[in-house]
Amino acid sequence: MTAEGKAVTTPASPPLTERQEARRRRILHASAQLASRGGFDAVQMREVAESSSVALGTLYRYFPSKVHLLVATMQDQLQHMHTTLRKRPPAAEEPAARVAETLMRAFRALQREPHLADAMVRALTFADRSVSPEVDTVSRLTTAIILDAMGLDAPPTAEQLSAVRVIEHTWHSALITWLSGRASIAQVKIDIETVCRLIDLTAPPESSGSRRS
């Protein structure tokens, strides 16, 4: 995943009508429900279409493949997380501690739905160039979550954005190793807290510990 110091945007496309947006919401809900029950293999396009009450051809117009659908599902889940985190921001004083707290809260949200988390991560792993816009949006959402937690008073520096990229990579890798049973939650917490220290190392002296009002 890559980080950019910009607001989260979606690829340019005609805006959806209210009816189309409602249909898309049903599709994403059905995808998440199926994935929660059985993981990646349980998300079959025909079953998603039936569960969301849309024609199979219509489903494919929204999402050309299961990978597109599950990456969009992760985008949707991250947007919900971002909204929740903004309502209850981290309380720590230092930026690094705030980011670590935020990412662990996001991690624990995924931990509560391990089959869904595994399905979404597998989709990101399988994504090819045709899914690049959706993958980029997931990355920008992750970046936005981290930058919000940092609470900067000024635009991030190049060094800070580099640190954010490393943090994103580590968070994603930690999620994969946990899902595969190769890391405990305790180890994930240690790794996240360790990599988040890069934030304090790259912060300009006058902005260290600052928070956005």
Image: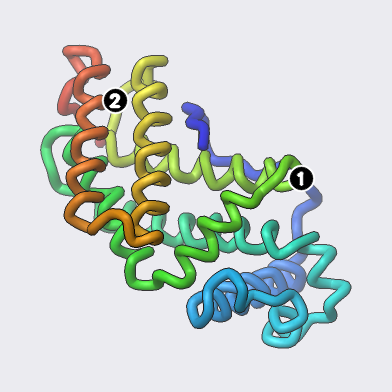
Q: What x and y, as percent, mark residue 61?
A: 84, 64
Q: Residue furthest left?
A: 93
SS for dot 1? helix
Which sits in the foreground, 116 or 49?
116
Residue at position x 65%, y 77% from top?
A: 26
Residue at position x 33%, y 61% from top?
A: 181
> Which mark, by number, is residue 162?
none
Q: What x and y, as percent, mark residue 50?
A: 74, 87
Report which quarter residue 184 is drawn in.
Answer: bottom left
Q: Is residue 193 left or right of residue 21?
A: left
Q: What x and y, as percent, mark residue 132?
A: 68, 41
Considering only vertical position in the picture, is 205 above or below 34?
above
Q: What x and y, as percent, mark residue 170?
A: 36, 39
Residue at position x 78%, y 47% from top?
A: 13
Label 1 neighbourhood size at 10 Å, few (<14), some (14-19), many (20+)?
Answer: few
Q: CA distance from mark 1 to mark 2?
A: 37 Å
Name the residue type under label 1: Ser
Residue at position x 64%, y 51% from top?
A: 126
Which sits in the foreground, 154 or 132?
132
Residue under numbered circle 2: 153
Considering only vertical position in the picture, is 198 above or below 37?
above
Residue under numbered circle 1: 130
